[in-house]
Image (cartoon, grey):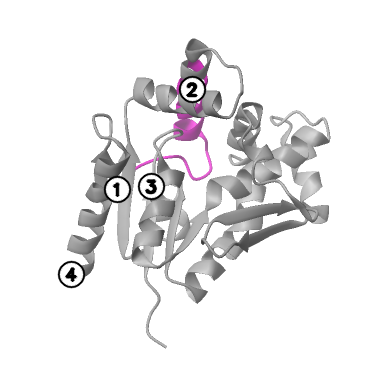
């Protein structure tokens, strides 16, 4: 069997990682792995159990009984299951974002999920997105991209996404949450958000979705042919 290829896409919250990584995987015929959705699922369990996400001991105590499943439809879209329930939409609620950010900072949670993520890369050609894919999860990835945009641009995209789903949110609140999450992710002691030394920076502040995807495809083609 030929060596599997892996593309790591990291970046801050709201940079469009999931949307662009999914589209990139589809264009390449790779498996898309949304690691953020996995952490959101852990956060959802903490939320449902009434646990403060900053109470690390309480969150870690959930792990042994946690049944997290990943599935893929014919369209290649990743589905998340929690104790057999499809929670793919529920985990996208705005209030779950803070839970995901807090639980993902816990080394026990990251260790719990690390091998599962790497196993997918061993078995498939993957496009995997997150915050520490190129630095921790897949440090030997064939292509590493650090996807970013200004906090204001990312907050606006997130705000519009919430509106499209019928969720009420103030733009200023979303912007504040984006900046707070940036600070938490960059300063956490375990796997902080940072650009890998060999990652290519892709700033999409001034680009629309099609332009951003074209940029990523160009980066991947150039790196794989190098």
Residue, disc 2: 159
Query: What is the magenta range?
Result: 176-195
Labels 4 and 1 touching (C-beta < 8 A): no
The alpha-carbon separation of the residues under discs 4 and 1 comes to 18 Å
Q: Which mark is residue 213?
A: 1
Residue occupied by mark 3: 20
Are the residues at dot 3 and dot 1 in contact (C-beta closer than 8 Å)? yes
Residue closer to the observer: 56 or 18: 18
Q: Residue at the spot x=65%, y=39% of the render?
A: 91
Calculate the distance from the C-alpha at mark 4 to the C-alpha at mark 2: 38 Å
Look at discs 4 and 2 and give the one toward the viewer.
2
- Please name the residue shown 50% across and 29% down the image: 161
Q: Which residue is mark 4?
A: 225
* Front label number (4 vs 1): 1
Per the image, label 2 sits on a secondary structure element best described as helix
Residue 140 sits in quarter: bottom left
Question: Could you tell which of marks 4 and 1 lies nearer the N-terminus?
Answer: 1
Q: What percent of the width, then of the height, locates residue 94?
A: 61, 27
């Amino acid at each position: 069997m030929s060596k599997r290829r892996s593309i790591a896409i990291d970046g801050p919250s709201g940079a469009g990682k999931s949307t662009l990584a999914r589209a990139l995987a589809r264009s390449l015929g790779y498996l898309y792995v949304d690691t953020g959705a996995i952490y959101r699922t852990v956060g959802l369990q903490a939320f449902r159990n009434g646990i403060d996400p900053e109470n690390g001991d309480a969150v870690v105590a959930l792990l042994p009984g946690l049944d997290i499943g990943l599935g893929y439809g014919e369209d290649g879209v990743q589905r998340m299951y929690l104790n057999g329930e499809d929670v793919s939409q529920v985990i996208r609620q705005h209030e779950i974002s803070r839970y995901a950010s807090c639980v993902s900072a816990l080394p026990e949670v990251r260790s719990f999920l690390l091998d599962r993520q790497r196993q997918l890369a061993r078995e498939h050609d993957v496009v995997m997105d997150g915050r520490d894919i190129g630095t921790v999860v897949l440090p030997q990835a064939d292509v590493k991209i650090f996807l970013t945009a200004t906090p204001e641009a990312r907050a606006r995209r997130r705000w519009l996404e919430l509106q499209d789903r019928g969720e009420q949110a103030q733009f200023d609140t979303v912007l504040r949450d984006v900046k707070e999450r940036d600070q938490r992710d960059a300063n956490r002691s375990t796997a902080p958000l940072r650009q890998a030394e060999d990652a290519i920076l892709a700033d999409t502040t001034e680009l629309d979705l099609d332009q951003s995807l074209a940029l990523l495809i160009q980066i991947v083609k150039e790196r794989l042919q190098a």
